[in-house]
Amino acid sequence: MIYKFCITIFLLAVSFSASAQRTSVEEYIEQFKETAMNEMKRSGVPASITLAQGILESESGNSELVKKSNNHFGIKCKSTWNGESVTHDDDATGECFRAYTNADESYRDHSDFLRANKRYGTLFSLDPSDYEGWANGLKKAGYATNPRYPDLLIKYIEQYNLQQFSLAVINKLPLMDIAKDIPGSENNEPVEIINEKSADAVVAKNISTDPEMLTAINKTKCVFVRKGTSLLVVANNNNISLGKLMEFNDMTEEGIISKDQYIFLHKKSKTGEKEFYIVQPGETLQDVAQKNGVQLKYLLEYNNLNAVVKLNANTRLLLQPGGKTVVIDQELKKAKQNCVQYAAESGGQGPCLQQRLQ
């Protein structure tokens, strides 16, 4: 009798311990909300959808698949996968699933998986705040076989107010208005999502709407954007698709703008207003193209350059067809001038030119 009682107590303790170690939905959201928002900035996949899928597919990080592979989105190997993998019983026994070193890799691959597959292409033409459209579109495109998949995603988004994270990324909800606590946590107070009318009145703080900053370079409309702004935010605030915005600005990588610059809202010109431009220290071909409102491919063509060449300061780059490029070595000129001055001050003593230029 005592033996059976001890066994029962042991099993209850084990059960309680396992239950205590499970991650709650609220804890999962708190842990991965920043990752989801960063992925939205990088790829355009709404943070609300990413989090809802993560909650559903990974059982809030508690699934067997997550524990053995860090796969939070149930993505199977497919023929294109060359990374690590594990076998897991799903629709069939022993199916191949992708495996990752950590959760961040899984979140990134989820974004890339959606971006790379043409069947999901129409989703990226939707408003990023349209979570219902995304949820239904994922099911229609074949992401999941469960007929209730869209309803489940929408339920999680609305129940846990995941939409706030998407709105923050596209600056329809200021970050200061995002509740520090997820519904169901300590204060247990619901988080209010501002309505669309008031949301549209919120201006992205990093994107200037000052008439002086909405300008034109080389007769092409552009806007001044601060470092740290998402390209997706710029696109949404100017009613341009992310793909078009990248094309207009000769960009190949999505994500965060790394330095203050003008972003063009229309296709740049083939030629510059001036015949040539003198490269400043640290400038790249991309910098020159943006500063002069010239398409990068024509800048390369006029100067017989490739896109990976490193520019030297004081190089003359042509902005129009014809002419010759010239390197003005001002440093050498300055060194010679200093040398002459040094020689005069020292009474002509010593090989100053060689010393100065070594």
Image (tube, rainbow, N blue to C red):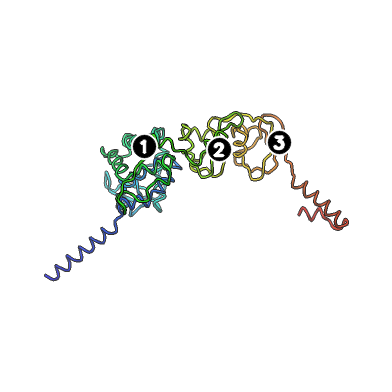
Using the rendered view, name the quadrant where residue 328 is placed. Answer: top right
From the viewer's perspective, is the residue at label 2 or at label 1 nearer?
Answer: 1
Counting other residues with Cα less than 10 Å from the Cα at mark 1, is it few (<14), some (14-19), or many (20 or more)? few
- Secondary structure of the residue carrying tag 2 is strand
**Residue sitting nearer the eye, 187 or 215:** 187
Counting other residues with Cα less than 10 Å from the Cα at mark 2, is it few (<14), some (14-19), or many (20 or more)? some
Q: Is residue 110 above or below residue 293?
A: below
Direction from residue 55 to residue 102 in the image, left or right: right
Q: CA distance from mark 2 to mark 1?
A: 28 Å
The numbered dot on residue 325 is: 3
Q: How many numbered marks does the figure carry? A: 3
The numbered dot on residue 224 is: 2
Question: Which residue does the image show at 70% across and 37% down from the upper left?
Answer: 316
The numbered dot on residue 195 is: 1
Type of residue at label 3? Answer: Thr
Type of residue at label 2? Answer: Phe
Question: Which residue does the image show at 32% across and 34% down from the upper left?
Answer: 140
From the viewer's perspective, is the residue at label 3 or at label 1 nearer?
Answer: 1
The numbered dot on residue 6 is: none
Using the rendered view, name the quadrant where residue 152 is placed. Answer: top left
Counting other residues with Cα less than 10 Å from the Cα at mark 3, is it few (<14), some (14-19), or many (20 or more)? some
Chain-order first, disc 2 or disc 1: 1
